[in-house]
Image: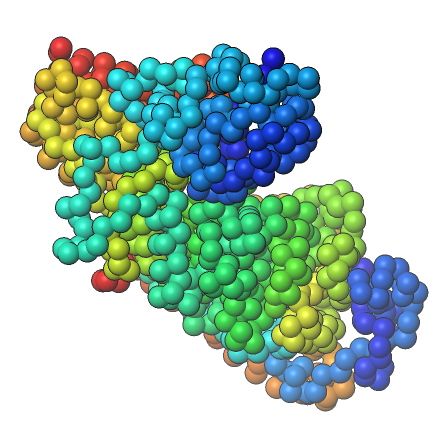
Amino acid sequence: MPIDILMPALSPTMEQGKLAKWLKAEGASVKAGDIIAEIETDKATMEVEAVDEGILAKILVADGTENVAVNTPIGIIAAEGEDAKAAASGGAGQAGKPAASSPQAAQSAPPAAVGEAPQVAAAPKAESAVANPPATPKSYDASAEFPAGAEIVSMTVREALRDAMAEEMRRDGDVFVMGEEVAEYQGAYKVTQGLLQEFGAKRVIDTPITEHGFAGIGVGAALTGLKPIVEFMTFNFAMQAIDQIINSAAKTLYMSGGQMGCPIVFRGPNGAAARVGAQHSHDYAAWYSNVPGLKVVMPYSASDAKGLLKSAIRDPNPIIFLENEILYGRSFDVPKGDDFLIPIGKAKVARPGTDVTIVSFGIGMTYALGAAEALAKEGIEAEVIDLRTIRPMDIETVVASIRKTNRCVAVEEGFPQSGVTAEIGMKIMEAAFDYLDAPVARVTGKDVPMPYAANLEKLALPNIGEVVAAAKAVCYR
Amino acid sequence: MAVAARKTKAAAPVKSAAKPAKARTAKAGADKASTAAPSNMAVFTKEEDLHAYREMLLIRRFEEKAGQMYGMGLIGGFCHLYIGQEAVVVGMQMASKEGDQVITGYRDHGHMLACGMESRGVMAELTGRRGGYSRGKGGSMHMFSREKNFYGGHGIVGAQVSLGTGLGFANWYREDGRVSLAYFGDGAANQGQVYESFNMAQLWKLPVVFIIENNRYAMGTSVNRASAQTDFSRRGVSFGIPGEQVDGMDVRAVRDAATRAIEHARSGQGPYILEMQTYRYRGHSMSDPAKYRSKDEVQRMREEHDPIEQVRGRLTREFKVGEDELKAIDAKVREIVNDAAEFATHDPEPDASELFTDILLEPAKA
């Protein structure tokens, strides 16, 4: 019985990759453990090992094919004694997998639970907990903030963050990056790729796995006026360091009567990735947003990630910069140029509308924008607001929208109690109660530690359907 | 207690009543040199002893006054006095250079005065007044002076060790030849981040001197009840950080060890640990009746090892400084302290508008 070789997933969030190179030719014999191909993702190049023995009967996806979806059959192995030709002509699919031998087919394969419009969620892969749509949703247009005449390029959030750091490090010798695997490994999520090569080991510093200690060292250096960027491999690990972030970084300016500021950026992925369980999925936006003396930034798009990170590095205050692993690989339009900054503390209208205001931030925007598209099909025009900064919160932009729509749904992946959406709801009560035609609704992560099982994880996270339902409810439809 | 500790190499001739000296360097290796060696106590000139006397007396009188004002309700909250430990910070400062940074925990008044911060500003911060170093918003445990390179004043036990390592990191990054002096107690020495910091400081050869002020009690818990290894000079052994035990009641021994440690750090060889064996006469804070130790123990320390009396004795016996001259110094110190107390009592509280200032800095315009 011929065996399909499937495109492997190399990380919890990988959806697709490039089949860079076959190392075995058709007809070659293959033993378990042989390296048969190389796969590239935007993070890394990895080798594919054979797990079965036999003859490589057919190569289904050619060298250099981009965007091959995970689990796509890429080749066929005929077992010992089998007729390789016959096996090949039998083709993919015998193992019960859909054939996807062209890049086009591969591209449309992975739809998604978390972030895409429901109409594409049809293929078997819909059970996956994550999505990785290849491009910016149509409804998200950031260009109004781009400098006039700037050349626009498409880049991933990951690349945008890297460029922001590189540009600011070129601009200011006091800026340096420290964290686990930021230098020689090129970043655990490849966000710091290339920085060591350009700036050297003194400014791109691999630390031991000691968050408490290196966060304190970063804060101490910042108190002298240096401008550290401290990368946490995930903000889950920053819990080890949270004393230094809050008691030392956030409070020293006040406790010193204004003498001693702390210009530091703490950044890294925050919130749920995919199937990494309760200890690696926590969203800390609400925690840090509770603390005076901090600014908390949580971008969604690549242009915001770049413009806000540059502003954060230039800011004289301690900044919590919350990224998202799932968003790292998504591409958006970004203007070229070193002077593109997005101000901290300014929300933006990501999609104009008239009937209901949907407020979110970070990866929550994927649900908000997806819901807006779905609602539009039912004749409800949602105005979607991306807070971008959690603290200080630009509630004015939200209120201006509510004056128009009179209805609001707030969306986040974090827990409901004392969450960011709880704060949004209260602020709206204080500032716009008279403009409301319905109580503010919220859609949040469920009040449970993140489960591992794919179906439970999907249930624990918000989804587009919940946002649509909430929006309809506040519209009394 | 109070073992005068030295590196094995002899430096100066024996002058004072010899106490057994013990080498304790991680470099030299564990217990090799634990047998008594002849003391080679550093000597001070008359000027150095006079300087140390003045500095230590200022701290002593300041702290006594602070204790008094606490009792009068003028100082609130927590107030941790440095009485008994004066020789540590004064001796360290005598070996440091302009530009070297100092950072410590919450028993910080003495460090601030030794760094040259004004008595008025420190005392007014204790009373929570607008003329305080933090304009009344920090209090006893949270004071800073960028001008004097004093980086606090930290209320979280052990936090200043990582922060102080960060100061050393900044010196390494800037290559400016400065050394960070990071003070912490025997209690903080058991915190995890201390060892994270030791590791990185040695890994990157950061110019930091870790000064462990072993006053024998972490609040009410004696060193023996809290620490598996009570020789704190060895706490860096597994990182290869050299360390020494020092008689922290003798300002000359402190200055001597500090000179070696600071030179080690400044010359690019990385961190150095000094365990200062010292004693606090008062409770952990003003609200601590100190029932965990005997009155005799305290009395013995005061009578036999008091850092100020040691210097005073030398000044009169060896340098023939007259009572009048010493009394003039005492009077001058009292005048400074009384002036600070007077100022701190009558200085107004911060304006209510101060509540919302100094939370964030305004970013520079792009």
Q: Nearer the viewer, residue B172 or B44?
A: B172
**Residue A188: percent from the left, percent from the top?**
52, 44
Residue A451 appears in the rendering = yes
**In which quadrant of the rendered view does residue B124 lie?**
bottom left
Determine whether, in the image, residue B108 is placed left or right of residue B225. left
Q: Nearer the viewer, residue A180 or A335?
A: A335
Determine whether, in the image, residue A156 is placed left or right of residue B296. left
Colouring chosen for the image of the structure: rainbow
Residue B290 appears in the rendering = no
Relative vertical location of residue A461 with respect to residue A267 in this rendering, above or below: above
Label tally:
0
Q: Nearer the viewer, residue A314 or A432?
A: A314
- The residue at the point 69 percent across, 29 percent down is A31
**Residue A239: percent from the left, percent from the top?**
51, 38
**Residue B345: percent from the left, percent from the top?**
38, 61
Determine whether, in the image, residue A120 is placed left or right of residue B160. left
Image quadrant in which the N terminus of chain B is located: bottom right
Relative vertical location of residue B78 with respect to residue B91 in this rendering, above or below: above
- The residue at the point 66 percent across, 29 percent down is A30
Q: Nearer the viewer, residue A9 or A422?
A: A9
**Residue B59: percent from the left, percent from the top?**
57, 68
Determine whether, in the image, residue B80 is placed left or right of residue A423. right
| Residue that sits furthest to the right in the current view | B35
- The residue at the point 36 percent across, 25 percent down is A105
Relative vertical location of residue A334 with respect to residue B346 in this rendering, above or below: above
Image quadrant in which the C terminus of chain B is located: bottom left
- The residue at the point 31 percent across, 49 percent down is A306
**In which quadrant of the rendered view does residue B289 lie?**
top right
